[in-house]
Image: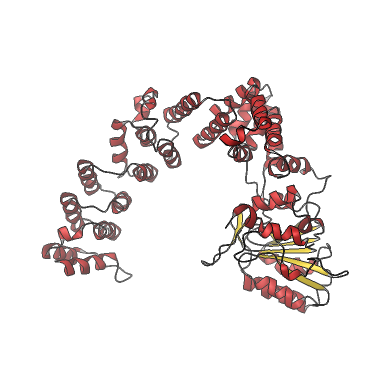
Amino acid sequence: MVLRSSIALIVAAVVAAGPAGVAAAGRKTVCTITVNSADERETLRRRLPADEFDFVELVERGRPDWLASACQKQVRCDALLISGHFDGGTEFYSDRLDAREYLPVDELERASCSDSCPGLFAQLKEVYLFGCNTLNAEALKFASAEIERSLLRSGHSRADAEQISRALNARHGESNRDRMRLIFKDVPVLYGFSAKAPLGPVAATLLERYFQSESGADFATGHVDPKLLGLFAPSSMTLAAGLDDADPLSGHRQDVCQFADERLTMAQKLDFTHRLMGREMAEVRMFLDRIEKQAGTVTATTRQAPEVAAALDAIAGDTGARDRYLDLARDADELSTRVRMLDVARTIGWLSPEAHRTAVLRVIGDQAARNAIGPEDVDLVCRLNQDRRLDDAARRIDVPRAQAMKPGPAAALACLGHADSRMQVLRALTSADGNDAEIAQVYLGHRPVGDVDELRAMTTSIAQSQIAAAQVRALDTLAGLRLSDRESLDALTRLFPRTRSLLVQRAIAGVLIRSDYHAIATADVVRVLRQHRLRSPEGDDVIDVLIRRLQASS
């Protein structure tokens, strides 16, 4: 599916709407986006008077150019029903394996800000968002500790910094509710759910009850219907209204639309980013997701356009903004944030490739020195050095030995090519600390065991561990290696009769069944497995499958 044209589904129009694509005078048009369940749509179609309402399904299955079709047809919607699972802020989607259509919130935002298809938004009186958390008011973004520190560095008192942080949270929290209000600007009534929404058949049943009570006269008029809210209240239905120009968040919408509006050129968007960099860096940090996406659209080709080159030169020459931005990047709490900010700085000309590499290595070293490396950071560092280009430069990282011996920092250093650190990580695989073991698992996912001596050391360590949970985690990691080393396989078969944990036995069976089990397919091994297996309360399990396969191979 072509994202820009088909995903903008939101706004799609329908051939079935008629030659002009516009409802007859006096009639109302109900537009529907059926990403998952059609139950709600069919109930409305059945219950609303056919001589008063036209229905337009905006999703054209298999057609990639929904947006172009919509704009050409100029369908004007009085009500919009969106039905689909909602993942908490990113998109509406279907749980059907054969469904390829989905609805990204970014595309709704883009269509709204660009006014690319005004028929959907200009006349809307009501929107029905049938998905979980579609109007949840909980903030998805927060002004973190690094933002408050940035405010203090820029000269604010602690009291002012705390007050500004609260204001930034209110303005930039971007809850699902706020984003829907931003998208459906000036729409009088938005119905949605603050928590779990009813599934399609249940929602359809509630709608049937609603119409059976002789309700529905106010449908698509823009008037709040207390009966509808009352029926769906146990299912967390709630109410909102689209932003208007007097709303405190209207200024934030204007900023958001500077990133999303397709009518603006890349140079104009870069000029806005430059102006944004003149604000408090604390607020710039709240816009990082959008700045990062915009920077990702700057390519070697687009840089050659004179107006784009001029905009980038203006940003690159703003040393004051650069220094304040890089100070915040170095002070961010999370490694991923620091790296993302440095990547943006490279793209917009504030860091050369060499300076960027040095800065990235420095922040990795800082995090390691503070023992602030978790599994997600290990994943990031290994991905950054997937091509091993950082191996030589990484030798310049100076981490105190006491910290370098700990699993998180050791794994980060091992990702950067430190051979001594690798053994520290392998030992963490059987750690009693689940976080340490997860760090080792993530690391081995990027740098798998390829040496037979390492493999044998790991199996010996697993066999010697006295902690069943740690053994299971380590064995699950081994299972993905598809062992063929006879000595390692023998070590695991010797562990099988000694353990008193059914989960450990199952994990051993999981390793063996994925390995070259023909190498151990002997009558003695089968006998040991049969004699010492701990009975499963659920009946046959992977141990039984392994025994049958060994018998067939012996």
Q: Which residue is depicted at the point 67% across and 75% down?
A: 205
In which image quadrant can residue 241 be found? bottom right
Q: Is residue 479 left or right of residue 200?
A: left
Q: Position of residue 67 (x, y in %)?
A: 69, 57
Q: In this view, does 209 lie to the left or right of 87?
A: right
Q: Is residue 68 left or right of residue 531?
A: right
Q: Which of 501 and 33 is in front in this view?
A: 33
Q: Which residue is depicted at the point 21% across and 69% down?
A: 548
Q: Can residue 225 be seen in this view?
A: yes
Above or below residue 376? Residue 538 is below
Image quadrant occupied by the C terminus: bottom left
Q: Which residue is depicted at the point 80% across and 74% down?
A: 215
Q: Can residue 219 be seen in this view?
A: no
Q: Which residue is depicted at the point 34% across and 34% down?
A: 414
Above or below residue 533? Residue 250 is above
Q: Where is residue 236 in the image (x, y as percent from the top left)?
A: 67, 62
